[in-house]
Image (tube, rainbow, N blue to C red):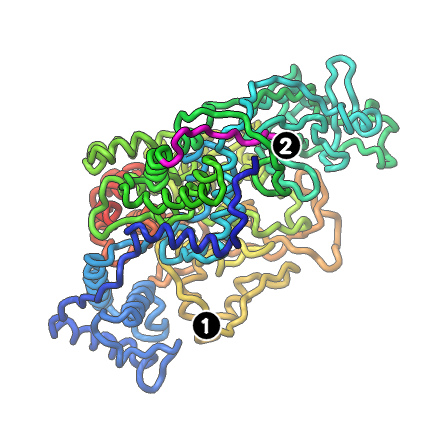
């Protein structure tokens, strides 16, 4: 029997047709509604605003001069039009930040600025609330590709990965789940159809359930045997294969292992560090190692000296997948080096000794899969007739076996019973007979066109997985019903569809009860799936998804490697988890007396007494500059620009992510300030010249100081007193770091001082951090706004500030404890409202 594929219709046409079909079930998008303007302001208030503009703004933004193409003398004193609202919002932000009026102009008193800020805030909030009554707070939004991938996995219970099939999602201030930024196209619909077909084919039962097997493999087998005595050494004492170099040639793939079926496998690696006083780390890769194949890094591990130790991991493998162990930090024996001994067994340096790779699997938690049971219930299965091998790259690997046929005595009746059940689970709410009817009709049409029962059911299921009810989070204006609340809560903390317990509570109408909602929030936060929340939120808030965007120059930063980068990511995510788990004050994100370190990170940061690759909580030495996110290498790397640091890039990063200030974009046509890696000038010197341009000065007074505060940290988060420079002609003896010659030289000294727009100054990073800590409410507000954006799919607006202020007021006494903030957000009207 052929694999399920709707290939007889052009894919883009079919995708749009399925979308239209699914939209016809009574859940079309809400119609546009007329805007209700806020009430008119008292004349005394408007007079005060006009007076403020005349005193501080009209000289630069009036009839004669419009700097930045902004004119305020004719700006309406209301908030009925979107363009006017955006202008007033920008005016408020710039006045509050101190970039308007310019520094050389008289400064408005705080009371004057407060009048303007409060008036704009109230006007924007009233306008938003009026729109919310009819349109709802959150724009109808679709699942982003991460959520879609997670949902397919959890709905069908199969370890398929469809994320890379889908186009990247648009970002809004770092977040990829904001409704207004998530458009959809025919290309995406075509990809959704491909993803649905792939996942459904993987979920359907096959000819046999593979019973788990245990097999042992060695590096010295297959093609690896030719490396023994030439590149590698095989020890007769225990059969271990010893590798002395971290080079990728010869390949350390375990050549004779190929996964024999799709499923989850347990891989146990046994070995030790050879001729070494310290542990030897190694990376474990898995996947298809053929040219163009998909390989992935599972993680980093280490073998210790002495007796052999074993490391066990679980991997989801496809048929034919293999393994590779790549040792790290070995620069020893190489058969092509003239200064090495002739044979590897004569080499006396450190080595990585692998005795065996024991593989057990595939292991199934359920069979048939959850998706099969959901779609076909307990209908009998039978072996298929003629098997048609799918085209290369289409559908599951044929080694998994052909799909079984499902026996149905009454196909129409079975479909009428089973499809509504499948759709209710997929759509995350009960589905009525009328809503299921288009899919049942599609099933009937497929039967009439010659499809068998299985193929027709899969076609209807694919239509459901391309439906707006699956792709979009459907919510009605006002307070969310229990099913919509369950969906929002689950996608916030688990990044996937609600599980059975949430669905049962929603069906019973109990989830909206505050005590039960709090209990479920705790349950979700304590579950392993909450790791998705940690990863996705830190990716968005801290921009960790771009850790690979730049590769530091190897001459300037020879200590940087893939193991360090992996450790940097683990540090930040484990730190986030620790603050969440222990319910620590939110100020801990700014300053802490501990960090989450392993030996590699401790060496990088200069923290003594830490060994091994395991990440754990480590108290920081007294007086250490470390502690808090702004001192962590992952944050410092993603906020760096290229192979050097930029106070502008880092300044914007700190303002947006830690202070809640969105700086305006640079004027068009203004060139970027590029770092000088030769070390002739610092960026501070280059920026001083840049600020002489009048159109640049105001914003750079806001942006540059936070960036200057981080100048003592280099591109990869190391501490520096001087910039590194690549000399044109090196002079004097070579500079040594950790006993190794390096090609860079010490450049100009670092100056980490600055002055904020409110006049407060600092001489170094520690003094700047104290300024941040002096206003815990500001950081708490910023963090709450980021969580609201991530949790609801809409960035916090003026109408949300009343709820946010309530949360801040109620949590201030406890120091805005992080876990408590999440609970308060979920209990808030902002979170529980469409």
Q: Find the magenta span and give its range.
A: 399-412
x and y percentages locating residue 58 in the rendered image: 29, 80
Give the answer, above or below, for where 589 lies relative to 281. below
Tell me, yes or no, whether the highlighted magenta stretch contains residue 160: no
Give the answer, above or below, for where 89 lies relative to 11. below
Task: Tell us which disc is closer to us: 2 or 1.
Answer: 2
Q: Quadrant of residue 268?
A: top right
Q: Nearer the viewer, residue 337 or 86?
A: 86
Residue 783 is left or right of residue 608, and the answer is: left
In the rendered image, which quarter contains the N terminus? top right
Q: Residue at x 26, y 71 (%)?
A: 81
Q: Nearer the viewer, residue 667 or 135?
A: 135
Crowd class of label 1 (few under 14; some 14 to 19; many from 20; radius 10 Å): few
x and y percentages locating residue 303 in the rendered image: 63, 23
Judged from the image, the secondary structure of the residue bearing numbered disc 2 is: loop
Is residue 830 visible from the viewing direction of this image? Answer: yes
x and y percentages locating residue 673 in the rendered image: 55, 66
**Mark 2 → mark 1, Cα distance in angstroms:** 51 Å
> According to the image, label 1 marks what residue?
667
Closer to the chain start, of discs 2 and 1, is: 2
Residue 276 is left or right of residue 515, and the answer is: right
């Amino acid at each position: 029997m052929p694999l399920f594929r709707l290939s007889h219709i052009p894919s883009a046409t079919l995708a749009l047709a399925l979308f239209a079909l699914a939209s016809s079930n009574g859940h079309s998008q809400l119609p546009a509604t007329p805007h209700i303007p806020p009430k008119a302001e008292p004349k005394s208030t408007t007079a005060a605003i006009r007076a403020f503009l005349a005193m501080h703004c009209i000289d630069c933004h009036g009839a004669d001069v419009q700097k930045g193409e902004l004119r305020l003398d004719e700006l309406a004193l209301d908030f009925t039009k979107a363009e006017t609202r955006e202008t007033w919002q920008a005016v408020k932000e710039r006045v509050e930040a101190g970039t308007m009026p310019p520094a050389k102009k008289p400064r408005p008193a705080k009371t004057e600025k407060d009048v303007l800020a409060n008036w704009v805030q109230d006007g924007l909030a009233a306008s938003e609330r009026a729109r919310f009554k009819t349109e709802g707070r959150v724009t109808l939004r679709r699942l982003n590709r991460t959520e879609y991938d997670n949902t397919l996995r959890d709905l069908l219970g199969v370890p398929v990965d469809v994320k890379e099939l889908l186009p990247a999602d648009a970002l809004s201030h770092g977040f990829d789940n904001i409704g207004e930024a998530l458009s959809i196209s025919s290309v995406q619909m075509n990809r959704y159809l491909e993803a649905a077909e792939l996942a459904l084919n993987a979920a359907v039962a096959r000819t046999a359930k593979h019973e788990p097997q245990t097999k042992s493999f060695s590096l010295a087998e297959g093609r690896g045997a030719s490396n023994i005595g030439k590149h590698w050494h095989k020890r007769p004492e225990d059969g271990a294969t010893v590798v002395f170099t971290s080079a990728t040639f010869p390949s350390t793939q375990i050549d004779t292992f190929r996964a024999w079926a799709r499923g989850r496998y347990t891989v146990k690696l046994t070995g030790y560090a050879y001729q070494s006083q310290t542990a030897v780390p190694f990376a474990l890769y898995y996947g298809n190692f053929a040219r163009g194949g998909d390989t992935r890094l599972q993680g980093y591990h280490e073998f210790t000296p002495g007796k052999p130790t074993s490391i066990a991991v679980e991997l989801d493998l496809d048929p034919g997948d293999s393994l590779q162990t790549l040792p790290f930090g070995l620069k020893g024996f190489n058969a092509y080096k003239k200064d090495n001994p002739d044979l590897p067994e004569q080499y006396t340096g450190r080595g990585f000794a692998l005795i065996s790779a024991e593989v057990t699997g595939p292991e199934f938690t359920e069979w048939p899969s959850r998706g099969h049971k959901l779609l076909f219930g307990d209908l009998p299965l039978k072996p298929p007739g003629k098997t048609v091998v799918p085209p290369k790259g289409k559908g599951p690997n044929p080694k998994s076996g052909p799909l079984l046929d499902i026996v149905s005595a009454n196909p129409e009746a079975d479909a009428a019973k089973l499809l509504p059940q499948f759709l209710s689970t997929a759509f995350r709410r009960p589905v009525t007979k009328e809503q299921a009817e288009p899919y049942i009709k599609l099933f009937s049409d497929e039967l009439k066109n010659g499809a068998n029962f299985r193929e027709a059911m899969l076609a209807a299921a694919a239509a459901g997985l391309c439906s707006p009810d699956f792709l979009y989070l459907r919510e009605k204006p006002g307070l969310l019903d229990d099913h919509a609340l369950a969906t929002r809560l689950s996608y916030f903390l688990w990044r996937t569809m609600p599980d059975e317990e949430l669905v049962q509570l929603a069906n019973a109408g109990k989830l909206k009860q505050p005590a039960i909602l709090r209990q479920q929030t705790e349950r979700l936060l304590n579950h392993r799936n909450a790791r998705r929340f940690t990863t996705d939120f830190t990716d968005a808030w801290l921009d960790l998804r771009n850790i690979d965007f730049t590769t530091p120059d190897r001459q300037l930063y020879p200590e940087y490697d893939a193991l360090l980068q992996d450790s940097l990511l683990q540090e930040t995510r484990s730190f986030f988890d620790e603050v969440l788990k222990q319910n620590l004050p939110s100020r801990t994100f700014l300053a802490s007396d501990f960090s989450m370190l392993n030996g590699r990170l401790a060496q990088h940061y200069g923290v003594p007494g830490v060994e091994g690759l395991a990440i754990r909580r480590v108290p920081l030495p007294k007086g250490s500059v470390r502690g808090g996110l702004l001192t962590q290498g992952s944050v410092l790397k993603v906020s760096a620009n290229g192979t050097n640091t930029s106070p502008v890039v880092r300044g914007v990063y700190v303002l947006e992510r830690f202070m809640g200030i969105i700086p305006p974009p640079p004027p068009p046509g203004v060139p970027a300030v590029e770092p000088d890696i030769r070390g002739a000038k610092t960026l501070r010197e280059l920026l001083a010249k840049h600020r002489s341009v009048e159109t640049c000065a105001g914003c750079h007074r806001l942006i540059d100081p936070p960036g200057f505060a981080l100048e003592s940290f280099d591109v990869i988060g190391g501490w520096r007193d001087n910039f590194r420079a690549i000399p044109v002609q090196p002079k004097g003896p070579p500079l040594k770091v950790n006993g190794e010659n390096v090609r860079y030289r010490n450049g100009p000294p670092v100056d980490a001082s600055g002055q904020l727009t409110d006049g407060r100054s600092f001489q170094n990073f520690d003094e700047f951090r104290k300024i941040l800590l002096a206003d815990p409410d500001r950081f708490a507000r910023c963090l709450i706004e980021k969580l609201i954006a991530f949790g609801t799919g809409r960035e916090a607006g003026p109408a949300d500030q009343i709820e946010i202020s309530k949360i801040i007021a109620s949590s201030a006494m406890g120091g805005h404890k992080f876990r408590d903030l999440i609970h308060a957000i979920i209990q808030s009207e902002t979170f529980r409202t469409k």
